Amino acid sequence: MPNILFTCAGRRNYLINYFKKELNGGLVFAADNQNTAPALVDADNAIIMPSIHDDNYINSLKKAISQYKIDALISLNDFELPILAKNKAEIESTGVKVIVSSPEVINISFDKWETHHFIEKIGLKSPKTYISLESAITAINNGDLKFPLVVKPRWGSASVGIDFADNIEELELIHKLQLLKIEKSYDNAMSGDDSLENALLIQEKIDGTEYGMDILNDFEGKYFGSFAREKLFMRSGETDKAKTVKGDDFNKIGRQIGEKLGHIGTLDCDIFRKGKDLYVLELNPRFGGGYPFSHEGGINTAAIYVNWLMGNNNVQEFNNYQSGVIFSKCDRLLKIS
C-alpha cells in the first residue's frame, strides 16, 4: 500500500479520512505551513512546511518525501498547483508520483480568461466575458451585455473577491476597488506580463440552478466519468448542502472537458443551468470542496486513486453513483496538540 501526502491540507479532514479508510498498511500524511491546520489532526502523520511561496519550498518538500517514504503527492491548494506542475520532474526524481496536471492545463484552469476561451473553443457555453472595463461598457451601450454583472479576479480561488454590479456606477466603483485590492495582494504575481488592468473579468450573471461536477481522468489523462450535484446552499465559497444528480447532458459536458483538457486525476467544475442550456463557469484541477457529496453519493475516488497507484485499472466496482441523495456539511471541534 502506498504512503500518500496531502500538501496544503488545511481543513480537508474528510479527504484524509476517506484515504485512510482505503489504505490498509499505507499511511496518510498531511502537510501545512500552519501547525493548527485541522487536517493535521486526522492524518497518520503531520508535517509542518514553509509557505509555498518560500524559495526553499521545493527542497523542503523533497526532503519530506524522502524522509517519510512518500509514494504519491496530492495538492489541495489552487496557488500551489502551478508550482508543483512547473517542478514536477524535479520532485518526482525522489521516486514520488505527483498527481498534478501539466502547466498548460493548470494555466487554462487557473486563468479564468483562458478558461472562458477554452470552454468556447471546445463548443460548450460560457457566460459572456470581458477583460477590460472599457470593452464591457461598450458591450452594455451596444446592448450586447446586460446587468446584473459579475466582477471577479482573473486569478482567484474560493470565490474570494467576487462582486455584483447592477448599474454603470456600481460597475466602475467595484472595478476600481477590486483592482486596488489585487494590487496589494500576492494574487497580482499571477498576472505575469499582463498589466494590472487585465487582472479582473466582467461577466454576465447567469440566473439559474448551480451545479458542481467532479470530472475524473486517470493518471494518464484518460476520461473515466463525471459526477454532478445540485448546490442547495453555499458558505464561504464552498458547497454546504447538495443533492446528487445524474444526466446525459452532464456526462456529455464532462466527457468533452475531460477528453479535450486531458487533466490528471479529479477536476472540480462549476456549471449553471438556465432553461435547457448548461453554462460552464470554472475549472479547478484538484479535489474541490464539493467532493464529499460525490463520495457519499457513491463514487469512491479515494479507492480509485489507491488502486491506480498500485497498478490496478479495474476500478468500476468503486463507481456506484446514485441520484437524488442530499447531504449537508456540519462543523466539529478538534483539539490541537
Image (spheres, helix red, strand yellow):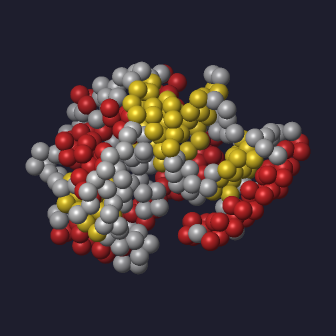
Could one spot residue 308 in this view of the protein?
no
Q: How far from the left and from the top, in percent, is residue 67?
A: 17, 70
Displayed quadrant of residue 94: bottom left
Displayed quadrant of residue 87: bottom left
Q: How far from the left and from the top, in percent, is residue 114?
A: 61, 52
Quick check: 223 above or below 251? below
Observer-nearest residue: 333 or 154?
Answer: 333
Q: How far from the left and from the top, in percent, is residue 31?
A: 29, 62
Observer-nearest residue: 328 or 116?
Answer: 328
Image point (36%, 78%), residue name: 56
Q: How far from the left and from the top, in percent, is residue 142?
A: 89, 42
Image point (19%, 41%), residue name: 22
Quadrant in which the C terminus is drawn: bottom left
Left or right relative to 235: residue 185: right
Observer-nearest residue: 107 or 296?
Answer: 296
Image point (39%, 46%), residue name: 287
Observer-nearest residue: 226 or 158?
Answer: 158
Left or right relative to 109: residue 117: right
Image point (52%, 24%), residue name: 249
Quick check: 86 above or below 330? below
Displayed quadrant of residue 218: top left
Total number of numbered discs in the rendering: 0
Could one spot residue 59 in this view of the protein?
yes
Residue at the far bottom in the pictured view: 55
Residue at the far right in the pictured view: 141
